[in-house]
Image: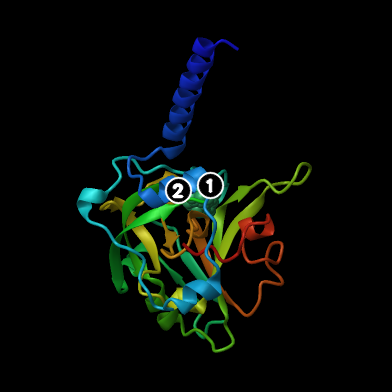
Amino acid sequence: MPIAQNLNRRALLKMAGGLGAALLTGCDQLTQDQTVRRILGAANPVDQTVQRALGPNALAAEFDEADLSPKFRPNGSTDPDNAAYQAAAGQGFSDWRLNVTGLVGRPAQFSLADLRALPSRTQITRHDCVEGWSCIGKWSGTRLSALLEKTDLKPTARYIVFHCADALPSGDFSPPVPYYESIDLNDAWHEQTILAYEMNGQDLPVAHGAPLRLRVERQLGYKHAKYVMAIEAVESFANIGGGNGSYWADNGYSWYAGI
Ligand SMILES: Nc1nc2c(c(=O)[nH]1)N[C@H]1C(S)=C(S)[C@@H](COP(=O)(O)O)O[C@H]1N2
Ligand SMILES: [Mo]
């Protein structure tokens, strides 16, 4: 191949690469860390034991208003194809209730007003998707610890499961299965673990999980369950979904996705 043509080809490839990266990002905020991740292709979760050894109560980095991503990319489900969910959304979630079940002394239902009346936290954090992009957003919500105290978590409980309104593919000839996630009690009691009802100072938009989504800031994006309809305290995952503790874990991803 003549040298000139070769150079053109290289210049073109470089351009195409840049374009690809821009499309993938969907956010202006790119940290050096993320650049490294993009080069590697995807984020690799940090092992749970390694992360806990660094400090079980360590906080994820928090940012300033000036750092907020002008556009926060929605990902995965963005409008659940679920009749009950759509009906609730149509009513502005006024009749919507969060169900708390399983290994709790006081199973209960919470309206959005009930959740807003419980101790809350606001945090500006970076959301890292396993696909290799990240966005910074501001989240306000009920502290999960406050909800667990109110419902009297039983000593046999080991995990908190989040059941969602949306369903995702489960294989070529099978119907979609509900999205769900879970965390252990260390993350459940963690200071920054909240059930967010607000994003960037507004009611949580449907694309980002209205009316309620989990923020579990020391883990990758897929752990942050959107459209949370029910919370269940369990001792094991044996009888839930594929038995691995989350939709993505049932599909081969790591259950613990530390960052
Ligand atoms: N219920 C539900 N939660 C979900 C998903 C989903 O498809 N359904 N996608 C996950 C993934 S992979 C990411 S990166 C984030 C995206 O959150 P966002 O739409 O607010 O950006 O939600 C996570 N939580
Ligand atoms: Mo993700």
**In this orientation, does residue 76 appear?**
no
In the rendered image, the residue lying farthest to the bottom is 155
Q: How is the image coloured?
A: rainbow
- Vertical side of 233 occupied by 131: above or below: above
Percent position (x, y) of residue 61?
A: 33, 63
Query: In what element is the residue under mark 2?
Result: helix
| Residue in view at x 45 percent, y 34 percent | 21
Whether pointer 2 and pointer 1 mark residues with C-beta atoms closer than 8 Å, the reply is: yes
Q: Residues within 10 Å of mark 1 (few under 14, many from 20)?
A: few
Specify the amino acid type for callout 1: Leu
**In this orientation, does residue 175 appear?**
yes
Of 10 and 107, which appears nearest the observer? Answer: 10
Q: What residue sits right under mark 1 in the picture?
A: 40
Percent position (x, y) of residue 184?
A: 53, 75
From the viewer's perspective, tell me whether residue 27 is left or right of residue 11: left
| Residue in view at x 20 percent, y 49 percent | 66
Percent position (x, y) of residue 37?
A: 48, 49
